[in-house]
Image (cartoon, rainbow, N blue to C red):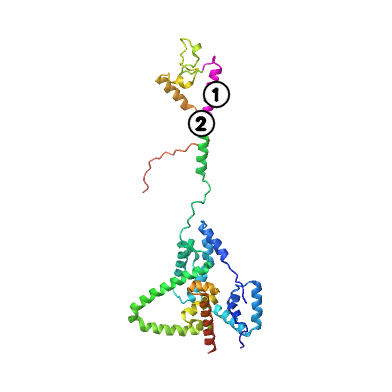
């Protein structure tokens, strides 16, 4: 058998056998092997060595994956908002809107009282708030009502304040869109034997 | 004359980045791609028992320190390096254990080795016998080059030597195999 006239080529014969060379390089090297008796014999030897490699036992991928460490997610990675997050966000928005609506309604009410003094705000339990100029001895008046409602509240009796607060509690400016939580009573049952 | 090798390192790099970002499916792809090669390398290096445990340990070690993988070598080369260290640790441990029972089991071990060699000659081709007769380092380099298709640079990473030394080991191994076959 003649020796190979370019021995450095033999370095790449295992790459040729494994298909690790690019198409052009593989074609060049294959042409050389075809013309070189020594390289042809060596390629045959390499293929035989690969073919007779001892068989490896099958490895279970799942058993390996079960042993791997848990994936750690970096803290900067954001996650999609959950349903509870969305619900909490909506609830806060509605609370803010309700507060704004109460303030605006209160302001409009105060203005209407000032603009139309002949129409008294009446309540079966609370004395009407009328300007001092129109107050009569029969009509219970609130001192300073023409200035502000807050000043008038200071002069109410304890019973009147309680009544007023009870009525305010019944007023809901904006109805809640969220359903009330269902309360399921816990009933004592017989223990399961 | 030089030839360019194809490289699959980019795909592995992508999978590693995905796994580090929290995509556990990337681990499945990485393990599936390299588990068989690790098992073959272990068998070719002379391991006969608990191959699956060895491959498992290799992956566990690799994934536990995956954030330190810098990509200077391919992922498969890195796995081979880890597996080789585990095999060396295992052999050291076995040598220590063997030394403690050598007096009792010495003769029977010699008988088994002779019988094993006889069976090997009958069942395996002469090429396999020639490879098995190489020195441990030559066989390791020859196996990585011929059976796994690693480059000399990759072999130098796995074995812990220089690229030139890996090349010399391979050529010496090839000469020894040819001599064995010509005898």
Res. A61 in view: yes
Q: Chain of mark 1?
A: A
Which residue does the numbered mark 1 point to in the structure image?
A108
Dots 2, 1 in contact, CB < 8 A: no
Give how far apart the Cα atoms at labels 2 and 1 are: 14 Å
Kindly identify the residue that appears in the image at 53 percent across and 72 percent down. Answer: B154
Outermost residue toward the top? A137
x, y (%) of residue B64?
45, 62
* Quarter of the figure with the N terminus of chain B: bottom right
> Going 57% across and 80% down the picture, which residue do you hit?
A46
Q: Quadrant of residue A25?
A: bottom right
Crowd class of label 1 (few under 14; some 14 to 19; many from 20; radius 10 Å)? few
Residue B15 percent location from the top left of the image: 54, 61
Q: Is residue B35 magenta?
A: no
Q: In this picture, is A93 found above or below A104?
A: below
Residue annotated with mark 2: A99
Q: In the rendered structure, which segment of residues is drawn in magenta?
A: A98-120
The image shows residue B42, relative to residue A177, as above or below, that is: below
- Residue B133, horizontal then vertical, whole percent: 48, 83
């Amino acid at each position: 058998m003649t020796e190979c006239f370019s021995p450095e080529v033999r370095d790449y014969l295992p790459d040729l056998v494994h298909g690790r060379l690019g198409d052009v390089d593989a074609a060049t090297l294959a042409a050389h092997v075809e013309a070189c008796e020594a390289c042809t014999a060596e390629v045959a030897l390499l293929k035989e060595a690969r073919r007779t490699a001892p068989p490896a036992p099958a490895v279970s991928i799942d058993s390996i994956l079960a042993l791997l460490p848990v994936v750690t997610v970096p803290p900067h990675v954001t996650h999609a908002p959950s349903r509870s997050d969305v619900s909490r966000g909506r609830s806060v928005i509605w609370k803010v809107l309700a507060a704004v609506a109460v303030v605006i309604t209160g302001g409009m009410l105060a203005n209407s009282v000032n603009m139309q003094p002949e129409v008294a705000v009446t309540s079966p339990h609370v004395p009407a708030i009328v300007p001092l100029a129109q107050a009569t001895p029969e009509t219970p008046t609130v001192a300073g009502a023409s200035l502000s409602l807050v000043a008038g509240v200071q002069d109410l009796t304890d019973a009147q304040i309680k009544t007023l607060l009870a009525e305010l509690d019944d007023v809901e400016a904006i109805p809640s869109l969220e359903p009330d939580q269902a309360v399921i009573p816990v009933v004592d049952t017989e223990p399961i034997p | 004359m030089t030839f360019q090798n194809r490289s699959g390192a980019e795909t592995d790099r992508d999978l590693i980045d995905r796994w580090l970002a929290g995509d556990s499916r990337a681990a499945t792809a990485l393990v599936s791609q390299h588990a068989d090669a690790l098992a073959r390398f272990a068998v070719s290096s002379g391991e006969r028992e608990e191959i699956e445990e060895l491959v498992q340990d290799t992956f566990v070690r690799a994934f536990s320190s995956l954030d330190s993988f810098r990509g200077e070598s391919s992922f498969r080369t890195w796995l081979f390096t880890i597996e080789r260290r585990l095999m060396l640790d295992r052999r050291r441990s076995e040598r220590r254990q063997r030394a403690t029972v050598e007096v009792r089991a010495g003769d029977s071990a010699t008988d088994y080795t002779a019988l094993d060699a006889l069976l090997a000659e009958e069942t395996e081709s002469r090429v396999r016998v020639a490879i098995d007769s190489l020195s441990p380092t030559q066989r390791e380099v020859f196996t990585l080059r011929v059976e796994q298709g690693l480059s000399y640079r990759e072999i130098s990473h796995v074995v812990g030597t220089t690229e030139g030394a890996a090349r010399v080991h391979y050529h010496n191994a090839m000469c020894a195999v040819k001599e064995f076959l010509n005898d």
